[in-house]
Image (tube, coloured by chain):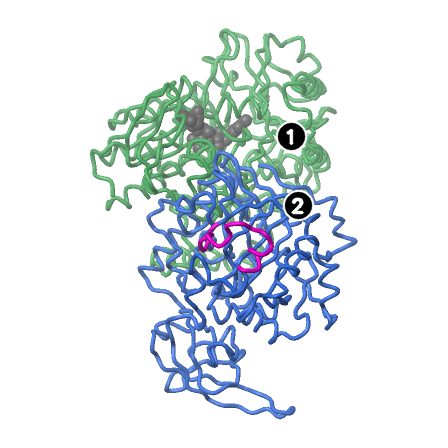
Amino acid sequence: MRTVHFEHRDHWRNKVYPSPFHSRQKELNVLRTWSRWYDYLSVPAYFDATLEYFAARNACAVFDLTPMTKHVISGPDALPFLNRLVTRDVAKIKPGRVGYCVWCTDEGQVIDDGTIFHLEPGRYRLCSQEHQIDWLMINANGFDVDIVEDTHDVAGLALQGPTACATLKRMGLAGIENLTPFGLAHFDFSGTQLMVSRTGYTGDLGYELWIDPDHAELLWDRLFEAGELHNIRPMGSDALDMTRIEAGFILAGVDFMPAMHTVRPTHTRSPLELGLSWLVDFNKPLFNGRRALLEEKARGSRYRFVKLDIEGNKPANNAYVFDRREKNIGWITSAMWSPSAKKNIALATLDMPHGKIGDEVLVEIYYQRELKWSRVMANARVVKDPFWDPPRRRLTPPADF
Amino acid sequence: MINRGEKMIIIGGGHNGLVCAAFLARAGYAVTVLEAASQVGGAAVTHEFAPGFKVSQGAHLLYLLDEGIRKDLALDSHGLKMAGTGLATTSISAGGDYLRINGDQLDGPGAEPDDQAAMPEYLRMMNRFAGVLQRLHNRTPMRLGTTDRGDLKALARLGWDIRRMGKRDMREFLRITGINVYDVLQENFNSELLKGALSLEGVLGTFLGTRSNNSVFCALQRMSNGARYDLPAGGMGAVSEAIAAAARSHGAEIRTSARVRRILTEGEEACGVELEDGSVIEARCIISNADPKTTFNRLLGAQHLEAGFAHRVRNIRSNGCVAKLHLALSEPPRFTGLPDEFTGDRLVIAPSLQYVEHAFNHAKYREYSKDPVMEITVPSLHDDSLAPAGQHVLSAVVQWAPHNLKQGWSEAKVAFTGRVMDVLAKHDPEIRGKTLYSELLTPADMESGFGMTGGHWHHAEMAMDQFLMMRPVYGAAQYRTPVNGLWLCGAGCHPGGGVMGSAGRNAANAIIESAGG
Ligand SMILES: Cc1cc2nc3c(=O)[nH]c(=O)nc-3n(C[C@H](O)[C@H](O)[C@H](O)COP(=O)(O)OP(=O)(O)OC[C@H]3O[C@@H](n4cnc5c(N)ncnc54)[C@H](O)[C@@H]3O)c2cc1C
């Protein structure tokens, strides 16, 4: 097994790096606020989170996802390695395809979620929220596999929204409209290779663009040039968070505690408790957590992950959830007023057996008006579908603009 | 679920594998033992290392063999005899002083009155504490965090065993089990010869120095059967042969020169083994006497395990650090100042705590001891079957000789043998002249010869974090492994190494119990 050496990264001197897009971000970041996303500077909002959000829903928006943790996994055992690592069947992710997945401890508790890109036959890239090198190295024991962290060798941009395809077409990516959701395509780009995947974190039409960092600025420039007529905007992490809550996507560290960062055993979550049982393939003879998850399936889970449609318009951040008899049955992990769904929405963790589709619950919302705190007990209903799931998300080819 | 009559395979015919086979066969199961070597016994074997000179190649003193096993398997009627029993331990020195420990009696020029007075109380205390561990030896370790009544009862019993020692002993037990023999011996005794000798109880066979924590625990573990040192007639191999005979008498099949290459699985079930010659034997119950790392990493493959479990296996500490010296002698050794009548004792070269600690220091830096510690027996003084008439064999456990030696053993072996002979020559200046033939086995030799990872005495270091429900690792501590149908029965399991047999019998019991009696 091979891993990259970190010496040259000079960590002790320079904890946080500017992204390869930094020169462009700096120009557009009129709020002059930066946040840290693991090894990189990231932008929470460039000019106005809500307007950036609207760009993603009504035009197209660009988000810098370079800081995502990335590993290339190859070698003769790459597939069996991944299949033992994640809960779904990676053999079903064909070359040129991408799959969403989660991976667990032996105890069946989620370490992280991410995407596996089947770059070419037998060569994969794993993208994740959290750093994973330790766990991947632990997992490599017994496999003939090469693991290289290439987080810093790949610059990434998400281009999301209804005019995304039109923008890429105008940028010269011939045939991009034929790319199906979770597909991968490669293009020549000024002497280098540009990889485009039809993936994203917004639950909408969208693409992710991957390129070597030396071409990052050029990509940014070409993209904004091509997108000008399509109302392209940069988008920060605040707007992205709004889109992912509408799409019903979970976020590590927010909707669940990554198992490797959790000390108290009951504070972790299994995939079944995060509504991800569709990602768990018990037909595979072995994967980390299989035995524990089979037991959980037989015994019943402790928690249920739900989407809530809450009355009123006051966002239910950090709220407790109660049943009709006002017994505490859980809490909200993500919440917002959804401008697109025109609903007060939330993601929540409820104690079993609460939280069946259609269940009515109460949410205790604290809110502030000109520094004065008030409280409401709002009615809420457990709903099945994501709050944002437009047909264009899957349509191929997407509508032209 | 395994039916009677259905085939079971035991990988390895070490004494634990043989004990396991005997108890399973006695319960009516069809057991086949597959042993890689040409003789059974593993590290409990007798070996002719020079024409006419035989020696216990690994273990040379019998002090842990479980009485119940000896009785239940009628080992005495299968040929087990002792050539020497209850050997005294004599601590020798280059200067000619010596100190003889015979039960709680201390004699010889090195004995001091204060120590003589303190010895009975020290032994009473240590034996009492060792008894607490001993009561854990003949059962499957309890699991933590379950609501199983057996587990809870076993835990309660352990608590009760400790509690009923009374306030003073309980406090002392809790105080010293985790600490080091250096401190405890300093608290109790004056004589360096005595402290050096007693400290070996805590460090022989382990990667611990006298000042390492866990060394009191190891001493208690070693003393758990009363610390009576016996010499089996015909060498340690006779113990294994007697167990093998018992197993055969119950119907077990034992094959030697049958090395297993791979454990075969189907989904999450073990389904057979593939031998080195390519042949495959199918079975739904496979019991491994090989050490845990060999079993999981080499025979099964870590890729067939969940990653967290495989990682724990990888982190098992199993860096062996014992070498074994065998000498064929034209006449008995004669140690400076030691009356000839004591040459047949268990002799130790550990003249002070400081000496022992210094000998260990080297191991930390992947070097062998400049002045090693030795535990010497001259079994031919008790047993004339081992050497031609008038001639003798000397067998010595030598520490420290770390498996992970910096320069590797092939290069260092000659130099280390020289050092060991130098140390011996300081005590018997004539030894080189009497030596007809010598053999030094390094941990690397033992790894390849006995198939034990790291050449480790216990397969996995004996320590509180690798004991009981954590031995060899959490998830395989009840002899059952995460792979259905694959079990462990060797020294890497509870209660650990030494020629004891308990791991083999406990495993057999666990398997029989899982099959519904
Ligand atoms: C130098 C030394 C001195 C010792 N001195 C003493 C002592 O004086 N007193 C004492 O009580 N203890 C002593 N011990 C410890 C004791 O010898 C061991 O703890 C004990 O013998 C272990 O028994 P076992 O049956 O569990 O394993 P082992 O004896 O290691 O047996 C395992 C068996 O499995 C076989 N095997 C492994 N892999 C395969 C395979 N792939 N296919 C087939 N077979 C396989 C091996 O050949 C071996 O026979 C000493 C150990 C050493 C190394």
Classify 10 Å Cα crowding around label 1: few (below 14), some (14-19), many (20 and above). Answer: many
Q: Is residue A101 visible?
A: no
> Which labelled disc corresponds to residue B384?
none
**The chain coloured blue in the image:** A
Question: Which of A366/A384 is in front?
Answer: A384
According to the picture, the residue beneath numbered tag 2 turns out to be: A190
Q: Amino acid at mark 2?
A: Ser
Q: Is residue B301 visible?
A: yes
Residue A168 on the magenta span: yes
Colour in which chain B is shown? green
- Give the residues drawn in magenta, as a range: A166-183
Q: Residue at x 52, y 57 (%)?
A: A112
> Which labelled disc corresponds to residue B400?
1
Q: Chain of mark 1?
A: B
Q: Residue at x 58, y 32 (%)?
A: B320
Residue B388 in percent (x, y) is at: 50, 7
Residue B207 on the magenta span: no
Q: Is residue A159 above or below residue B483?
A: below
Occupied quadrant, residue B485:
top left
Residue B423 in percent (x, y) is at: 70, 21
Q: Amino acid at mark 1?
A: Trp
